[in-house]
Image (cartoon, rainbow, N blue to C red):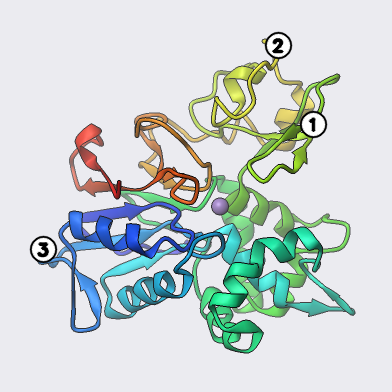
Amino acid sequence: MAGLPPHACFDIIGDIHGYAEDLEVLLGRLGYRDRDGAYRHPDGERRVVFLGDFIDRGPDILRVLKIVRDMIEAGTAYAVLGNHEFNAIAYATRHDGRYLREHTPGHERQHRHTLEQLGGLAVQDSWLDWFRTLPPYLANDELRVVHACWDPWAVEVMDEALSRHGGMTDAFMTEALPLDQNSALYMAVEWLLKGKEIPLPNGYAPVADKEGIRRSKIRVRWFGLPPRPTYPEMVFPASSTTDLPTVPVPDEALCALRLPGNAYPAAAPPVFFGHYWLTGEVAVQTPNAVCLDYSVARVGKLVACTWRRGEPITAASFTASR
Ligand SMILES: [Mn+2]
């Protein structure tokens, strides 16, 4: 288990995507001040946990990375890896004459801002090495943190692979991204960093995502699921694909995701995650599942949740940058 030290108070911050100004406003509102080379809180027990997805899309990627890294090195923050950082490593990793993340026009478009702002491939290398040091999840007895989805099987597969490879090495990356996309580690990375998806029901045309790419799968909840969920009960966020039929999701689709068996238990410690481009009012998904990605890169806001030992998460726990 990737251990999170047991501090009495954590400020958990969602996906930043290069929006350094929002990050600085939010840290300020939470009471952190930039001194001696890093943001620190006057309450010495208070720490930030970042949910990953620091890069791509926004105007100040390098500044975001520096703020986050300086805080981690000063011991005032922790961070987990996001799918965008994982993709950046894969984009630069070659195996058997191919890049593990192909250099297609779509992928190039996604990475262009990051490559430009980090000064091209050569300078990017040191940042990629740093990305490899970020854990895919963090947990202690009181809370859990992951970029997209908590699944106990995926956590176990991830732990085993990281310990066998000695970290996120090229060999780890190759096992995680086989050509046929058929490895336990591939699935574990998908779930932890990108979440769980099911195919659209028969007869439904592919739906365009926020980048205009037509997708034949929909992102689904992995928390607060009824025993026989219907499509509208499962799609997440609920607003992302409307007009789904009110029929149960087929067993095969659920089984493939280890759901609802591995759905997040109501009695487990609170889990914090990002990734899902939520919009609207900030709220918890269930009393112990809290998504903190409110689409700062798409006219949304950067959001933090302040967790304090022994206190429930309420509306007053949230702070936003805008
Ligand atoms: Mn993400």
> Can residue 178 be seen from the camera position used here?
yes
Image-quadrant location for residue 318: top left
In the displayed orientation, state which residue is furthest to the top: 246
- Determine whether, in the image, residue 279 is placed left or right of residue 214: left
Q: Nearer the viewer, mark 1 or mark 2?
A: 1
Residue bearing mark 2:
247
Q: Earlier in the sequence, mark 3 or mark 2?
A: 3
Kind of element beneath mark 1? loop
Cα separation, mark 1 vs mark 3, equals 50 Å
Q: Quadrant of residue 259?
A: top right
User: Which of the two labelled residues, at mark 1 and mark 2, occupies the earlier sequence position?
Assistant: 1
Which residue corresponds to the image point at 52% horizontal and 65% vertical from the top-left? 55
- The residue most toward the left is 42
Check mark 3 vs ligand 1: CB closer than 8 Å? yes or no. no
| Drawn side of residue 21 relative to residue 165, left or right | left
Residue 31 lies, in percent from the top left, at 15, 59
Q: Residue 114: x and y, percent?
A: 58, 71
Q: Secondary structure at mark 2?
A: loop
Which percent across, then down, holds residue 186?
A: 73, 57
- Asked if residue 8 shows in the view, the reply is no
Which residue is tagged 1? 206
Q: Is residue 191 above or below residue 59?
A: above
